[in-house]
Amino acid sequence: MSTAQRLSTASDYEQLLDKYDTWLFDCDGVLWRGTHLIDGALEVLQLLRSKKKSIIFVTNNATLSRASYKKKFDKLGIEAHIDEIFGSAYASAVYLSTVVKLPKEKKVFVIGMAGLEEELRNEGVNFIGGTDPADNTLEPFSPSSYTLDSSVAAVLCGLDTAINYTKLSKAFIQLNTDPSCLFLATNEDSTYPAHGGVLLPGAGAISAPLRFALGRDPVSIGKPGKTMLDCIKAKHDFDPKRTIMVGDRLNTDILFGKQGGVATLLVLTGKKHLELIPLSHSSLLTTFFMNAGISHESDLSPEASPVVIPDFVTNSIGDLGQNKKL
């Protein structure tokens, strides 16, 4: 099994900065938690720009459009440009418009929020559901009140904090009745870190009832899926050998980087579960990971399921800029 290099010295960080020209960053849990910046994150981003590094923000957050996400960056004082921001909402819209090539007369049934709708609208993708007041109700759902919409060619599930039985039932009817209807998910994150370090159910938890009821999985567009990286490659020219993905989740960020053929740096600021991973300067180091599937030493045995091991590990993104020598 490969091992991760634990970064700790000024020389370690200097070498890392020199080795990679393009830096892909997850956001929640890496640069900020909720509405609060991770200590040192702003200074590290400024350091990278001063060294003429390319910066790309890659997030599975499907509740905000890129334009709205840009406002969050601005509010936090982080320099970011629209063409540097790649969210799963945007990638989903591009997937439908350019990969699926959804005909103009067809529509998407959306389980999601305004940011997802905005990206679909920008890509010329027609949709129903989502924030429609008729679907945002806690009234009991009556099957007789809904007629199958033959123009719906896909159901797209993102994080929806107003999820209800009506939305799930309509989506299920479309998918279960029409075998040609595509089942798509913006991403499959089981949880996400909210303000104060509290974990809340993620987009994967929203699509889970449909997966169980249908007995099939959706096509997932966000990390760790290849579709997100293809979306980035279409807009940015970079050398994978000189590119690094920085994230806080093994099963999304690090797997995304590994599958894309780029280096990976795991930061521990998003973790809340005590788990294990092999590191290069010690046989096993107890540390915090979220949803990595490594809870006992036996999970690291040759017989266990494959584990996604990052190339590098550090406590926080702020570590890259704490030493003045950098």
Image (cartoon, helix red, strand yellow):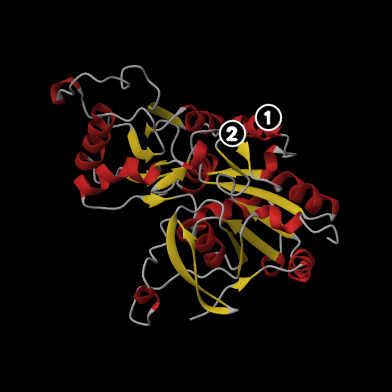
For residue 219, which numbered disc appears in the image? none
Along the line of sight, which residue is nearer the eye, 171 or 192? 192
Where residue 193 appears, as percent x and y from the top left, is 48, 43
Q: Amino acid at mark 2?
A: Thr
- Comparing 45 with 110, the one in front is 45
* Residue 224 in sight: no
Label located before the other in sequence (2 or 1)? 2
Q: Quadrant of residue 176?
A: top left
Q: Quadrant of residue 141?
A: top left
Residue 282 horizontal/vertical position (percent): 56, 78
Q: CA distance from mark 2 to mark 1?
A: 9 Å
**Tag 1, which secondary structure?**
helix
Observer able to see residue 258: yes
- Rendered residue at 74%/70% (across/down): 12
Q: Secondary structure at mark 2?
A: loop
The image shows residue 43 at horizontal and vertical percentages of 77, 47
Report x, y in % for residue 13: 74, 65
Give the mark toward the camera: 2 or 1: 2
Direction from residue 117 to residue 243 in the image, left or right: right
Q: Which residue is mark 2?
A: 35
Callouts 2 and 1 close, C-beta under 8 Å: yes
Query: Splitting the image into 4 quarters, where does residue 315 fall?
Result: bottom right
Q: Camera-side residue: 82 or 203?
A: 203
Q: Label 1 amino acid?
A: Lys
User: As displayed, is residue 279 above or below residue 17?
Assistant: below
Q: Of the numbered discs in the image, which one, if any, rests on residue 75? A: 1
Say which residue appears at 79% left-offset and 55% top-offset.
53
Picture layout, residue 245 above or below residue 122: below
**Rendered position, 245 above or below 73:** below
